[in-house]
Amino acid sequence: MFIHSPTTRKTIRPNAYAPEKDRSAKLDMVVVPKKGATEKNGRSETKQNNHKKTPLWSPWKLMLFALVFGLMGMLYLTHVFQTQEQLREVQLLRMEHERAMRIHTNARREYDRMMGPSEVYRRAESLGMIHGGATDPVITR
């Protein structure tokens, strides 16, 4: 347990119900009111302490806080659900793109096989053409 003294010295009023021997000492004391203090029923009160303090959480503040907090929660949940929906759409589009790329790659391979040198030579031989070899020049027009 920590015990500490206050940073400023507070003035303490004498006990009103003190024994008789202390009452005589009390009469010798002079009470000097603070600046801005008023006398009321023999006590000195400052003007600042006369005002009522409003509570920290009044009912309308609490209702407003709950309403704002509820709206923020609804916005967050809406954002989360929209993000999940967009993720599903992105995954669907990615799958379609990958399927289209596979179809394109397969078609490209088939085209390359049809137009490749070995296929061209095989077709030329089936038509009765003769392979010229490396010594025959290529004629271009």
Image: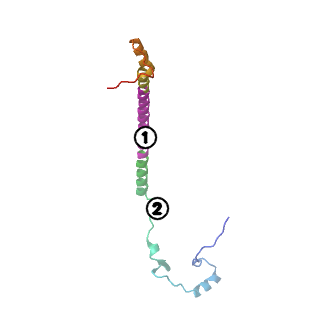
Kindly identify which residue carries mark 1.
83
In depth, the one of 32 and 118 nearer the eye is 118
Which quadrant does the C terminus fall into? top left
Nearest to viewer (mark 2 / mark 1)? 1
* Horizontal arrangement in the rendering, residue 20 relative to residue 45 (left or right): right
Q: What range of the chain is rendered magenta? A: 75-104
**Residue 87 is covered by the magenta coloring:** yes
Tell me where residue 2 appears, x and y as whole percent. Answer: 66, 66
Tell me where residue 60 appears, x and y as whole percent. Answer: 40, 56
Sequence-earlier tag: 2 or 1: 2
**Residue 82 is covered by the magenta coloring:** yes
Q: Report the disc number at residue 56.
A: 2
Tell me where residue 35 appears, x and y as whole percent. Answer: 47, 82
Circle 1: is it few (<14), some (14-19), or many (20+) Cα within 10 Å? few
Tell me where residue 18 appears, x and y as whole percent. Answer: 62, 78
Question: What residue do we see at 42% from left, 49% from top?
Answer: 72
Q: Identify the amino acid type marked 1.
A: Thr
Question: What residue do we see at 41% from left, 46% from top?
Answer: 75
Tag 2, which secondary structure? loop
Q: Identify the amino acid type marked 2.
A: Leu
**Relative to 106, is 124 above or below?**
above
